[in-house]
Amino acid sequence: MPELAEVAYFAKKWGEAGIGHRVKSVEVHAEKRIFKNGSGPKLVEALSNHTLKSAQTHGKQMLFGFSGGRWLGIHLGMTGELSVESADYEAKKHDHLVLRQADKSLVFNDARLFGAVKLDLSENEPTWWKSLPPPVSSPDFTLEHLEKGLKRRAKTPLKSTLLDQEIFPGIGNWMADEVLWQARLSPHLTGGELKPLEIRRLREVLRAVCEISLETVGKDWSDPPAGWLFHERWATKERPCPQTGKPLVREDIGGRTTCWSPAWQTRPARMDYDVADYGAPKFNAEGKVKSPYGKKRAESK
DNA sequence: CGAGATGTTCGGCT
DNA sequence: AAGCCGAACATCTC
């Protein structure tokens, strides 16, 4: 399920319910492949009687800080989720970790076991956390960082490169498709084939898609703006490209199903094309986004 | 019943 | 040597 926005949503859930409250007891339901870092049983001792103090996310990574210098790192993998349940909630199948607080339980569930749980004991945030790459929507996600990443993956299709967490922390399958569609770039283009203006455009769209996703999905699980590819790719029925009306294609690229619009993602020579009344970004001559998001969002509510 | 699923890692090859 | 690719991981759902 989770990409950057969903991860943010889950972390917020635990944070809002649990911060400031002591963990009375901890249940670890033996699934050793999930507990990295020799965590597992250690978690019981390490977290019991400590208070949850912080909840952060970075891309798809989550970090929960506890009193006494205990840090719980969680990655949701493909099917992980966090929930807040009642105090007497009974752990069900695939619940791997349950933190019991006075009046609630914080639950980590993951059917496919691709998730990961880590424990660190240190006064400050663990080193692995501090050395994560710049978040896509932060000022540190510079044009230089993007250029470097694209150069490194000069011969890889953009679709695969966008899933590289070292370059684009938090981008997953649906966000990658959304970005390419909004930027009108074919998923088959390689990093080395992009022109400077296209790289700028890619950066603008990346940041916009991340920010808007965080403000919708990440905030309250609400849908991203109307007009996004998002709404088509999750549709049970085949639907046409919202821009061209022509069929969307589903194709395997780098081992992941890619939903894209060949008639739309055509790498236009002109950067100043204008799309009337449309939820996705428009671009000016510098490849900058003239984003109508703010207004669109208000209208769609 | 088989295929595919919002992800990462590992091994083998260039 | 870094980058590229495919397979593997485990379970559920359509």
Image (spheres, coloured by chain):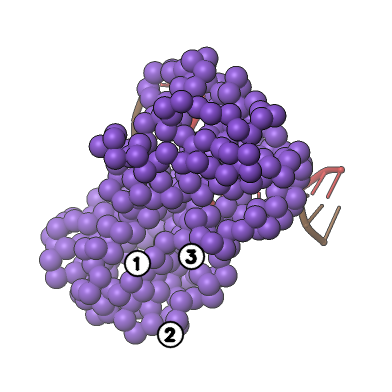
Chain colours: A purple, B red, C brown
Discs 1 and 2 lie in a common subunit? yes
Q: Which residue is mark 1?
A: A55
Residue A61 in view in this figure: yes
Does residue A44 lie above or below A298 as drawn? Answer: below
Q: Marks 2 and 3, Cα distance to the nearest angstrom?
A: 20 Å
Residue at (52, 18) in percent of width and height: A244
Is residue A162 rendered to the left or right of residue A73? Answer: right
Q: Marks 1 and 2, Cα distance to the nearest angstrom?
A: 16 Å
Residue A238's x, y, as percent?
Answer: 44, 17
Please say if the residues under marks 1 and 2 sit with CB atoms less than 8 Å apart: no
Is residue A301 rendered to the left or right of residue A104? Answer: right
Discs 2 and 3 lie in a common subunit? yes
Residue A286's x, y, as percent?
Answer: 63, 43
| Mark before the other along the chain sequence, 1 or 3 | 3
Disc 1 marks a residue whose amino acid type is Ala
Residue A300's x, y, as percent?
Answer: 29, 34
Residue at (39, 50) in percent of width and height: A214
Residue at mark 2: chain: A
Q: Secondary structure at mark 2?
A: loop
Disc 3 marks a residue whose amino acid type is Lys
Q: Which residue is mark 2?
A: A123
| Mark before the other along the chain sequence, 2 or 3 | 3
The C terminus of chain A lies in which quarter of the figure?
Answer: top left
Q: Which residue is mark 3?
A: A36
